[in-house]
Image: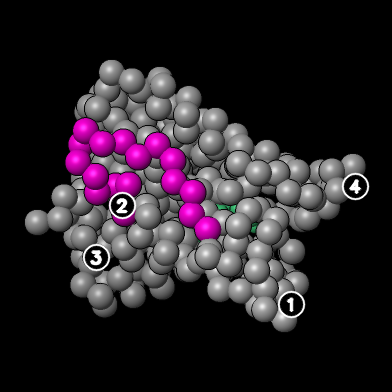
């Protein structure tokens, strides 16, 4: 039987892209899924698809990871059967804008920092104590190549992903001596709604990001998340960077005209 069968997996940002792909991948192992995001209707549609594909144990959480009281109330009072989370996928995140730092929109910065850094921290702080108490658990953060290499105009988004990298490392250090595992999966270009969100709904600009190259798919990333989650208990995958074959660094891509 798959080692993830019947394990309880919480995925933040499950309503789209990489998070939704992770939901499909974990569902295929027979895992029990707690799917969280702000757009409940999207989660309901995803749950319907997963159920059609054979999944049965799914719980949905309308959750804004930026809202600390909501995170604490929701994750602190999960239904009894759902409280013992085995795998946490901290995926909720976004970029807003692509501007020079000195010309950036402060509202964009706040949204990225509140979501990618503070939101990830709130969720982690709410769930890891239970994992420590149970002496069981795996935290898988979705970082980015942007956390390793800062690119022009990426400033604050890159800083949030550098923070995710530091927090992953810090959590691993702080959990030494427990059986808990901590990983970060750090992709390059993945075609999702990411760029549409970054460009505030400008679909043409978003499409251009992936034009002329073959980007990663959300399923490619989910496969790597599954690899981390399915190692034997004594193996901790600390960090994986993956990028399209058409990408060599945060800024260098091979585009066909
Ligand atoms: P999508 O825009 O497709 O998905 C983002 C997800 O995050 C959505 O489900 C969204 O749900 C959720 N989310 C955003 N803000 C919040 C919030 N405040 N509270 C709860 N959920 C939230 O993009 P991706 O799938 O690409 O992004 C997923 C992760 O992958 C992000 O952390 C991103 O930084 C990272 N990443 C993406 C790459 C890419 O090229 N696409 C590359 C490297 C990393 P909802 O709006 O319903 O709340
Ligand atoms: C998303 C990948 O390179 O657009 O984290 O920042 S990138």
Q: Give the distance between the C-alpha atoms of the residues marked 3 and 2, in whole angstroms.
A: 14 Å
Q: Nearer the viewer, mark 3 or mark 2?
A: 2
Report whether the residue tagged 1 is closer than 8 Å to ligand 2: no
Q: Which residue in the structure is indicated by mark 3?
A: 28
Q: Is residue 41 left or right of residue 110?
A: left
Residue linked to disc 1: 204
The disc at residue 227 is 2
Badge 1 crowding class, 10 Å Cα cut-off, few under 14, some 14 to 19, many 20 or more, is: few
> To which quarter of the image does residue 23 belong?
bottom left
Position in image of residue 40 (x %, y %): 47, 63
Label 4: how many Cα within 10 Å (few below 14, some 14–19, many 20+): few
Can residue 67 be seen at all in this image of the molecule?
no
Q: Name the residue nearer the viewer: 247 or 36.
A: 247
* Ligand 1 in which quarter: bottom right
Badge 4 or badge 1: first in the primary sequence: 4
Q: Mark 4 or 2, which is nearer the eye? A: 2
Closer-to-camera residue (82/232): 232
Residue 130 colored in magenta in the image: no
Question: Distance between the Cα atoms at labels 2 and 1?
Answer: 34 Å
* Range covered by the magenta-colored residues: 226-243
Q: Is residue 191 left or right of residue 236?
A: right
> In terms of secondary structure, where does tag 3 sit?
helix
| Residue found 56% across the figure and 73% down from its top | 214
The picture quadrant where one finds residue 164 is top right
- Residue at 48 percent across and 68 percent down: it is 217
Whether the residues at callouts 3 and 1 have beta carbons within 8 Å, the answer is no
């Amino acid at each position: 039987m798959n080692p993830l069968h019947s394990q309880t997996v919480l995925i933040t940002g499950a309503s789209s892209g990489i998070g939704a792909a992770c939901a499909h991948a974990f569902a295929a192992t027979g895992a029990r899924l707690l799917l969280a995001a702000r757009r409940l209707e999207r989660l309901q549609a995803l749950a319907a698809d997963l159920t059609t594909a054979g999944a049965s144990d799914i719980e949905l959480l309308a959750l804004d990871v930026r809202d600390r009281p909501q995170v604490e109330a929701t994750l602190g009072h999960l239904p009894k059967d759902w409280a013992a989370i085995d795998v946490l996928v901290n995926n909720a995140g976004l970029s807003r804008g692509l501007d020079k730092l000195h010309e950036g929109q402060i509202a964009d910065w706040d949204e990225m920092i509140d979501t990618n850094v503070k939101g990830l921290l709130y969720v982690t702080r709410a769930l890891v104590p239970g994992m420590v108490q149970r002496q069981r658990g795996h935290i898988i953060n979705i970082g980015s190549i942007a956390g390793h290499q800062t690119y022009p105009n990426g400033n604050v988004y890159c800083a949030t992903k550098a923070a995710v990298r530091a927090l992953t490392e810090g959590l691993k250090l702080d959990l030494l001596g427990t059986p808990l595992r901590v990983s970060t999966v750090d992709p390059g270009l993945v075609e999702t709604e990411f760029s549409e969100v970054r460009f505030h709904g400008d679909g043409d600009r978003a499409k251009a990001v992936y034009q002329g190259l073959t980007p990663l798919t959300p399923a490619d990333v989910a496969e790597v998340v599954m690899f981390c989650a399915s190692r034997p208990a004594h193996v901790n995958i600390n960090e994986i960077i993956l990028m399209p074959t058409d990408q060599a660094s945060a800024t260098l891509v091979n585009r066909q005209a």
